[in-house]
Image (tube, grey):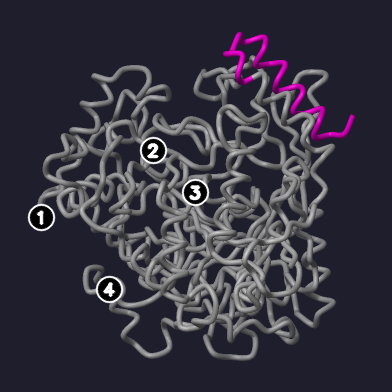
Amino acid sequence: MHALETLLASNCAKEVRMKRIPPVLRVCTLLVALPLAARSIPVHADNHHGHGTFDLLETTIPAIQNAFDHDIIDADDLVRMYQARIDAYDGPSTATRLNSYIYRNPHARADADSGKHNGWDNHDHDQPLRGIPMIVKDNNDTKDMPTTAGSVAFNGSFPKTDAFVVQKLRNAGAILLGKATMTEFANFLTNGMPAGYSSLGGYGFNPYDPRPDPRIALDAFGRPFNDGRPALTPGGSSSGPGIAVGANLAEVGIGTETSGSILSPGTANGLVGIKPTVGLISRDGIIPITADQDTAGPLARNVTDAAIVLGVIAGFDPNDPATAACLTPGNCHHDYTKYLNPHALMGARIAVPPFPANRAAVMNNAIAVMQGLGATVNLVPALAAQLPGCPASPPFIFPPAPGCSTVLYYGFKRDLNQYIKDHVRHSFPTQSLQDVINFNIAYGAGATKYGQDLALFSQMFDTTPGSTDTIRYQSDRAADISLSRGAIHAVLDGPDGIPGTADDYDALLFSGNSGAATPAKAGYPSIVVPGGTFQNIVTPPFPAGFNALDGPAGVTFSGAAFSEPRLIALAYAFEQASRVRKPPTFLPALPASSKIGA
């Protein structure tokens, strides 16, 4: 029996033992048999006059648009193909039950048909995302779909308008397949919430090993590992876009990051993820943690697609003051594909801080590849320490003692309340962070499976101007900026400490999201690229008989503010030389839906 069949049979058997409803068993039986029949069978597209073959799996934006241009497929074909994969692999009645979508757009095919009648699915090159099926994290406002951040307190909330990012995607011709599951409130509801879990969406599963954790032991917070969480993390908090794009359930996705939330699912799902400079992309209409660090960014299977999407969503928005930086020439660009240079590592200088031991093989291989392409790669000491976040576990110590940062807590209350005021309909019952807390208490265990400690702690802050808490926040934010930017430039400026000299470094290189925190506080950009795989060895170990599968591992380039062009060039050069991304083996092409020939 192949690995896929073994996995699906195992999942189905568990469903039988758990006495789930009979239809689930019937679906599982179908899917166990599916891989035997799924062999990328060509399909002829009715009413198309072009000639050629289109492969859905691991396709790219340029390949899709080439197929449009040559009348091999149209946008409706493409939407149907992705929807078939979502039907087969994503829902709770499927054996893999990836759960990347919290809401599927019922109008996706109508949107594709509308675009077809407007002509963009064939020859309109003014829309760089014409006909491209996308998934967006469910903290991005969509006026025609609920926006919930995974919280039952926002279930059914249709915002007033699209987020600025969503407007730009639609204007560029993108088709939204739906909204993505995510770690609730971008992993800022409580301590110890598993990546990809939310009270509204449930658990998301990594397509490279979509099984629940079987361990009966307790985690650091006293909660059992076998409570439904995944055995292989999908990364978070942008878990859903990572899962969907990694599993070929969408072409590209939009995530958000405050600290690691694009880089983490990027590395976990074998993807390219760009966490841009704060100010490159508007946050207007995105449920926040804090405007001090939040940003949106693309998740894609290759650097080219990520660069295309970044160019679409970058730019000035009068409703987000941080994007005023885009009015300065050279900071923001509408086309990042012009920086895709396969020779960019020739003569580049890369600094590598210490990395985790279980990622040593991936990092050492990446270093060797870069050196082989002509880069100078030097190991450097760890970046200077930053202020830790203040402890936020009951019994709360308030006000927090000096020596920790209050920025995220203060910002969460301030900016969530402002988001609700600006974007949530006044008729909707949840109108503040306090309302979220109260709703969760009344709702009970279904809302607070892992508690709501961070929300409770954040609510304690007085965010009025001039308050003691505001003064403390301002001091902590100034320290965060000074310490983080100082630590990064102490390395990037080279041994002589003088910027603009020959010993400067082009970028820092981290393992996955291990170095995310310092660039996040600085507001500086990072881009993660597939780098290899790692063994999913955990403590305490998995029980005998449970053979954990290897997971993807990425390498991350980080740089100074608005250095996206250089980082994209370096990432592209590495990607083209290494080509390590492999699609998940558990999600094969579906019969009669993965190829079209005419």
Discs 4, 2 touching: Cβ within 8 Å: no
Residue with the most extreme right position: 1
**Residue kind at label 2, given as amino acid type:** Gly
Measure the C-alpha gap from mark 3 to mark 2: 11 Å
Q: Which residue lies under the disc numbered 3?
A: 238
Q: Which residue lies under the disc numbered 1?
A: 465
Discs 3, 4 touching: Cβ within 8 Å: no
Question: Regarding mark 3 in the picture, which secondary structure is present there?
Answer: loop
Task: State which tag comes first along the sequence, 4 or 2.
Answer: 2
Left or right placement of residue 386 versus residue 214 in this view? left
**Residue kind at label 4, given as amino acid type:** Asp
Location of the C terminus (image quadrant): bottom right
Residue closest to the eye, 540 or 67? 67
Task: State which tag comes first along the sequence, 3 or 2.
Answer: 2
Residue closest to the eye, 424 or 229? 424
Q: Position of residue 406 (x, y in %)?
A: 30, 47
Discs 3, 1 touching: Cβ within 8 Å: no
The residue at 17%/54% (across/down) is: 422
Q: Position of residue 99 (x, y in %)?
A: 54, 37
Instruction: Identify the main secondary structure in magenta.
Output: helix
Question: Regarding mark 1 in the picture, which secondary structure is present there?
Answer: loop
Q: Position of residue 273 (x, y in %)?
A: 57, 61
The residue at 31%/60% (across/down) is: 163
Q: Which residue lies under the disc numbered 2?
A: 150
The residue at 62%/66% (across/down) is: 47
Measure the C-alpha gap from mark 1 to mark 2: 31 Å
Question: Regarding mark 4 in the picture, which secondary structure is present there?
Answer: loop
Does residue 237 sit above or below 231 in this rendering? below
**Residue kind at label 1, given as amino acid type:** Pro
Discs 1, 2 touching: Cβ within 8 Å: no
